[in-house]
């Protein structure tokens, strides 16, 4: 018999005994989840009217999200392979809470994420690449028209279908390749910005934007500054370091960096605290690396493009897009820093290659939108809270076709509402973050209570030894992160300064979010009643068998 | 109408075994079935340091214990986790490290001792309840445990047997699996496995209303997804590269005979249900290390599945 030995444990050869996975691999997925280029640049661009320093907001939010990493690494170590928020909350807080919070955060709200993904796809990939290829009208059509937005939604759905059909193994490989390619692209962007200068940028901007997009070149730079000024751009380089404005920028900032826990995994048996640390470091290194890259990018943008110009270009773009002015922005496309960087060369080939490489940040990340939701749909079906057919796998394509349709069809409807801005749906961007943050809130409360409500489970776990002043680390980390989440929810929902657009004053936001929670509750209680009639007691799912 | 409770892969967890035995009463089941892999994977030494002091390391946490009461508590904790506690001293630890064959002997001794204790517990708890209990040891289980199970009064060894569930349903069982990277006790190449399973299934009078209780799930059934491993057994790509590792032989047998119900285990992270043709296939998964008994409660009624529910007990 083969065996591994240590002075503390004798292990025999048995199924499932694997060695520790690589922290680097875990890092890659967490790094993609807090995606600086897609999520980050998209949301930074919308923050033009806030005066809180973005570097400050990045640092402070990173500090608080560190506690999120601790909470999730601890939950995974206590209940590995258990299925995430849904199972943790169901086990600790009860089945109804677990179902409603998980189904809204990991399924319903992702319908709204699809048009946001589509925005990033058309702004960062489709429009710049088409323009570089000389297809000026199609490039602008994608950015400027509702039809272009909606076709981008359809393309996102099609991509995700392909990713799921590829299977997890192939998608994981694709992600790793995209990670390497995306980093090379980012390095090239950094080099352009590092060796470029403001004068060259201004000259090339005014020379190349008209060639690419047909805008007027004369005075483009100054016109953009003026339009940004008129839009109320408040961002300044080096300003806004007081704590209050920094904190007020954070409810926007977390749109991009609240998600390092998406990359968390735990496999393997007969190990303990090491896996807790691996999980934590996988997530936390990604968070820190992203914060550092973000700061480097900000500094380089300021050096060559100038922060003032970048933010005013953003102001000009979103001010028009959100309907606050009828005057189109001088630069007719989304101010993509990578596109601005490659304007420093006249070579269309180099421009194309760099933008394509930067596009890998999108392709390596976008598949996760439906992968996570299909898992939650499956888990709910296994708990008999959804019909069995939702977990069916298509025999030929090996894809969960029904679960995918439950994602895609509502996404297309929400995508259409977003694309044509029906019911002011374009104003709901931060609802996407709020609903998932609420799901995390449930898991955070579960984590705080875990050592007290599931004492045996906690004491038998590898994190039981981590205490601060006699109080379990998971509880302390949970309380700190809970405070942060409550602050975010207060700002989003009450929003005294009217900064985020999704408070109780926005009827679309209130109705949209309430509808999701009501739908989740109806499904839960409806199925519970229906199953009872079939003689199935759903409450038995999580009841612990007493040991006599 | 007959209600079955099925669980699998308790891997030496004392608490999971006890929950399994008590599950019949808890879920009002007539029959309880354990799918295989009863035995644990590790021995945790509790090392006497002299006087009343002992040292034990569990989940990479070192515990200093004082007195028999604390040692007993640690033994209970180790057993709950699915490991075998072994009270020893530094000299014996050195001896074991130098002589691997002695570790093998120790494993055998501890495994058999535990299975014996489990049978005694089951016999006591099931006496007079009318609940029938079947187990089919899995690929990780050494052959010597079979005789201990056979000797039990209320736990029946189901490997290779046709079990009469009720007037409408029979069950066949096997804990054998296809080849794993760990080269365990009851595994063989797919053609041999198919031959073995065919021979068992042929004993059934009515396969279409039968229950197939096979440890390894059908290949590519979504119940058999596990992390892809490197040759040195590290999960590839951070454990995200999932691949099907079930048995093609089991799949072919299920497709060919289309039983009413398939009960599987083996892949702890493969919790779920799937349909292969008309067959409802269930893998309840396993969380034995956390002391949670994952299971499935299934009610059979005249050749049909009336209801089923996956549980986390």
Image: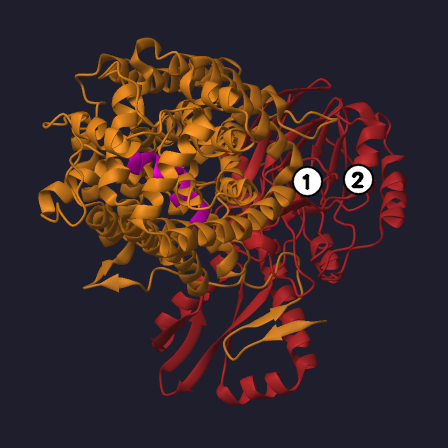
Chain colours: A orange, B red
Task: For label 1, count other residues whose C-alpha is less than 10 Å away and answer few (under 14), some (14-19) or many (20+).
Answer: many
Residue A24 magenta: no
Residue B36 pos. (x, y %):
67, 49
Residue B204 pos. (x, y %):
85, 31
Q: Give SS at disc 2.
A: helix
Q: Which residue is mark 2?
A: B250
Q: Residue at x 63, y 87 (%)?
A: B98
Tell me which label, 1 or 2, sits earlier in the chain: 2
Residue B105 pos. (x, y %):
68, 76
Q: Is residue B64 above or below residue A535?
A: below
Residue A31 magenta: yes
Q: Which residue is mark 1?
A: B264
Please tell me how many numbered marks the rendered image carries.
2
Determine which quarter of the picture holds residue B201: top right
Q: Is residue A319 above or below residue B178?
A: above
Toward the viewer: A31 or B312? A31
Chain name for mark 2: B
Query: What main secondary structure does the magenta stretch of the protein show?
Result: helix
Q: Residue at x 71, y 17 (%)?
A: B302
Q: Give SS at disc 1.
A: loop
Q: Is residue A23 visible?
A: yes
Q: Residue at x 83, y 35 (%)?
A: B253
Determine which quarter of the picture holds residue A436: top left
Q: Which residues, given as a range, are shown in magenta? A: A30-45
Whether tag 1 and tag 2 are in contact, CB under 8 A, the answer is yes
Toward the viewer: B91 or A304? A304
Toward the viewer: B225 or B29? B225
Query: Marks 1 and 2, Cα distance to the nearest angstrom?
Result: 10 Å
Residue B226 is left or right of residue B69, and the answer is right
Q: Is residue A535 visible?
A: no
> Marks 1 and 2: same chain?
yes
Chain name for mark 1: B
């Amino acid at each position: 018999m083969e065996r591994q030995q240590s002075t503390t444990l004798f292990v025999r050869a048995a199924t499932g005994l694997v060695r520790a996975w690589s922290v680097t691999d875990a890092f890659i997925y967490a790094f993609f989840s807090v995606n600086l280029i897609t999520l980050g640049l998209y949301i930074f661009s919308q923050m033009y009217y806030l005066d809180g320093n973005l570097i400050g907001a990045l640092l402070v939010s990173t500090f608080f999200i560190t506690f999120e990493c601790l909470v999730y690494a601890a939950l995974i170590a206590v209940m590995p392979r258990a299925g995430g928020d849904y199972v943790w909350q169901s086990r600790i807080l009860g089945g109804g809470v677990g179902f409603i919070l998980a189904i809204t955060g990991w399924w319903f709200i992702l319908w709204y994420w699809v048009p946001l993904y589509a925005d990033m796809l058309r702004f960062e990939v489709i429009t710049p690449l088409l323009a570089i290829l000389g297809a000026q009208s199609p490039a602008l059509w994608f950015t400027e028209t509702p039809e272009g937005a909606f076709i981008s939604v359809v393309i996102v759905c099609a991509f995700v279908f392909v990713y799921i059909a590829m299977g997890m193994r192939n998608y994981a490989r694709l992600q790793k390749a995209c990670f390497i390619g995306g980093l090379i692209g980012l390095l090239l962007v950094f080099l352009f910005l590092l060796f470029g200068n403001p004068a060259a940028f201004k000259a090339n901007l005014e020379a190349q934007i008209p060639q690419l997009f047909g805008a007027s070149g004369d005075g483009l730079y100054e016109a953009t500054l003026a339009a940004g000024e008129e839009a109320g751009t408040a961002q300044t380089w080096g300003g806004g370091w007081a704590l209050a404005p920094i904190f007020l920028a954070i409810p926007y900032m977390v749109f991009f960096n609240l998600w390092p826990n998406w990359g968390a995994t735990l496999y393997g048996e007969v190990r303990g605290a090491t896996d807790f640390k691996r999980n934590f470091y996988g997530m936390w290194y990604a968070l820190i690396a992203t914060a550092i890259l973000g700061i480097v990018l900000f500094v380089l943008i300021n050096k060559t493009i100038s922060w003032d110009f970048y933010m005013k270009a953003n102001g000009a773009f979103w001010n028009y897009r959100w309907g606050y002015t009828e005057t189109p922005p001088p630069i007719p496309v989304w101010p993509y820093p990578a596109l601005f960087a490659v304007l420093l060369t006249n070579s269309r080939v180099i421009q194309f290659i760099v933008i394509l490489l930067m596009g890998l940040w999108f392709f390596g990340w976008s598949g996760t939108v439906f992968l996570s939701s299909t898992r939650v749909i499956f888990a709910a079906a296994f708990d008999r809270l959804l019909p069995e057919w939702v977990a069916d796998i298509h025999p030929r394509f090996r894809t969960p076709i029904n679960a995918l349709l439950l994602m895609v069809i509502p996404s297309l409807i929400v995508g259409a509402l977003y694309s044509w801005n029906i019911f002011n749906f374009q104003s709901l961007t931060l609802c996407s973050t709020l609903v998932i943050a609420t799901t995390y809130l449930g898991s955070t409360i579960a984590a705080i209570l875990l050592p007290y409500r599931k004492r045996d489970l906690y004491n038998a776990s590898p994190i039981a030894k981590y205490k601060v002043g006699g109080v379990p680390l998971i509880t302390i980390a949970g309380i700190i992160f809970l405070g942060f989440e409550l602050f975010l929810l207060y700002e989003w929902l009450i929003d005294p300064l009217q900064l985020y657009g999704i408070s109780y004053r926005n009827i679309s936001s209130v109705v949209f979010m309430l509808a999701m929670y009501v739908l989740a509750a109806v499904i839960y209680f409806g199925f519970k009643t229906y199953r009872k009639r079939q003689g199935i007691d759903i409450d038995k799912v999580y009841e612990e068998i007493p040991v006599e | 109408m007959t209600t079955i409770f099925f669980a699998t892969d308790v891997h030496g967890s004392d608490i999971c075994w006890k929950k399994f035995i008590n599950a019949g009463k808890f879920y009002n089941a007539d029959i309880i079935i354990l799918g295989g892999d009863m035995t644990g994977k590790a021995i945790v030494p509790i090392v006497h340091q002299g006087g009343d002091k002992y040292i034990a390391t569990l989940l990479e946490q070192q515990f200093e214990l004082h007195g028999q009461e604390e040692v007993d508590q640690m033994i209970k904790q180790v057993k709950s986790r699915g490991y075998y506690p072994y009270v020893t001293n530094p000299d014996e630890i050195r001896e074991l490290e130098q002589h691997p064959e002695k570790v093998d002997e120790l494993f055998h001794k501890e495994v058999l001792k535990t299975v014996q204790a489990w049978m005694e517990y089951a016999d006591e708890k099931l006496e007079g309840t009318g609940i029938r209990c079947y187990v089919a040891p899995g690929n990780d289980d050494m052959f010597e445990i079979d005789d201990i199970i056979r000797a039990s009064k209320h736990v029946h060894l189901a490997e290779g047997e046709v079990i009469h569930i009720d007037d409408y349903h029979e069950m066949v069982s096997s804990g054998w699996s296809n080849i794993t990277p760990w080269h365990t006790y009851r595994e063989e190449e797919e053609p041999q496995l198919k031959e073995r399973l065919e021979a068992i299934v042929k004993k059934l009078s009515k396969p279409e209303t039968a229950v197939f209780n096979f440890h390894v799930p059908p290949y590519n059934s979504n119940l058999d997804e596990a992390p892809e491993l490197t040759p040195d057994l590290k999960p590839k790509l951070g454990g995200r590269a999932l691949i099907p590792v079930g048995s093609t032989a089991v799949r072919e047998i299920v497709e060919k005979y289309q039983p009413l119900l398939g009960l599987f285990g083996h892949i702890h992270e493969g919790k779920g249900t799937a349909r292969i043709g008309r067959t409802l296939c269930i893998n309840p998964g396993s969380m034995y290390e956390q002391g949670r008994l994952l299971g499935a409660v299934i009610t059979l009624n005249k050749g049909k599945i009336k209801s089923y529910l996956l549980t986390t007990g």
